[in-house]
Each structure stands twice: as structure tokens, then as C-alpha cells.
Amino acid sequence: MGNSLQDELLKAGLIDQTKIDQAKKQQKKNRTQQPKAKRKAAKSKPVDPAVEKARAEKAARDRELNKQRDEVRRQREVAAEVRQLVRGHKHPRSEKDDDVPFHFENKGKIKRIFVSADTHKLISDGKLKIVNDNGVFELVPPAIAEKIRERNSSLVIDLPEDKPADGDDPYADYQVPDDLMW
């Protein structure tokens, strides 16, 4: 409905619109300055030590929660970056029946993926790396695997390297084939 007194004075011609606007600005200014005055009065009062301790504890809890949220957000960002790298650079795998299994170890368990013979050779030569993409094992080039390793090293599956034979090893002359079928 508005301010009826202002409306009546405006209709009577006793005041004009600029006076009404100035009055509204002054009222708004008074309302915004009033809470500041209340804060100054609150600061001048003596503070109870128990209340101050509770505020400090709450602030510490809030900081800890913010750290945890930031860490979760950072982990999500890293996971999204890794997912994008894998999906953009993964090596295509065929759906043929003549695929051979490639066995590897992941977190103490033997896993396998089915790949073509050519892809099996590329993995064995180190030209493709195995990456865990949220439970699905994908093949990516070594450069992409290193980028993923920088973000989260546990997602890149390291295959055992050929080690130089010991002089005492009686089986040093016998080479174990890479493509040994189990």
C-alpha cells in the first residue's frame, strides 16, 4: 500500500518526489548503520571465557571440515582428469574371439585382460601401459601413463622388468617366455 501520508502530501502538492526519495534513502541509511552500532556495543561487553573457548573450538572444527572438503574436491578433480586422459587416449581393443589373455598383478591379485596378439606384443615391449580406470583396465601410451602417474600413481599398473641374471642362478640360461599361457 505504500506510505499513505507521503501519498497524501504528494497529492496535496506540499512535497515533491525528490523529497520522498531523500527520506527513503535516509531511512535505509539508518537501518544499515544500526547493526554496526549493535556490534560495537557487543564488543565492549566482557566476553565469557567459556563462550570464547566454544567459538575457538567451533572455528577449529570448521577449518578441519573445510580441509576435508577441499581434499575430497581435489580428489574428484584428479579422478576427472585421469578419466579424461584415459578416455581420450586409450588403445582400442578388439572384440574378436581369437584374443589372448594378458595376465598381470594388481594389488596382490592376478588380473587379466583379453587383447589381440599384436597388442599383447606392444604391452610386453612396454609400448602400451595398463591403467586402472575405476575398475576397468585400459591400455594407454607410456606418455599418458606418466601423466596419470603424476596425478595418482596407484592407477598405473607396473609390469615386472627383466632383471639381469645373478651369477649364482642355475636357471640363468633359460629364458621364461613373456607370452607363457597359464
Image (cartoon, rainbow, N blue to C red):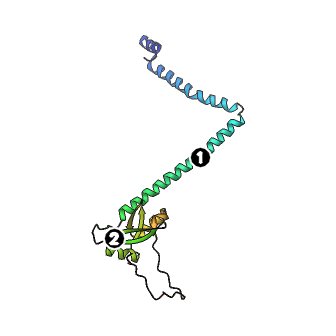
Sequence-earlier tag: 1 or 2: 1
Who's the residue at 59% across and 44% down the image? 62
Picture quarter containing residue 129?
bottom left
Single out the mark in the foreground, 1 or 2.
2
Label at residue 115: 2
In what quadrant of the picture does the N terminus appear? top left
Mark 2 burial class by Cα count in 10 Å: few <14, some 14-19, many 20+: many
Q: On the rendered structure, is 122 left or right of 62?
A: left
Who's the residue at 63% across and 28% down the image? 38
Return the residue nearer the eye: 179 or 11: 179
In what quadrant of the picture does the C terminus appear? bottom left
Q: What element carries label 2?
A: strand
Q: On the rendered structure, is 120 left or right of 33?
A: left
For the residues labelled 1 and 2, the Cα–Cα distance comes to 49 Å
121 lies above or below 59: below
Who's the residue at 34% across and 69% down the image? 114
Residue 116 point in image, percent of width and height: 31, 72
Q: Mark 1 points at which residue?
A: 63
Q: On the rendered structure, is 41 left or right of 104?
A: right
Specify the amino acid type for callout 2: Val
Q: On the rendered structure, is 115 left or right of 1?
A: left
Name the residue at the front extreme: 182
Label at residue 133: none
Q: Is mark 1 on a helix, strand or loop?
A: helix
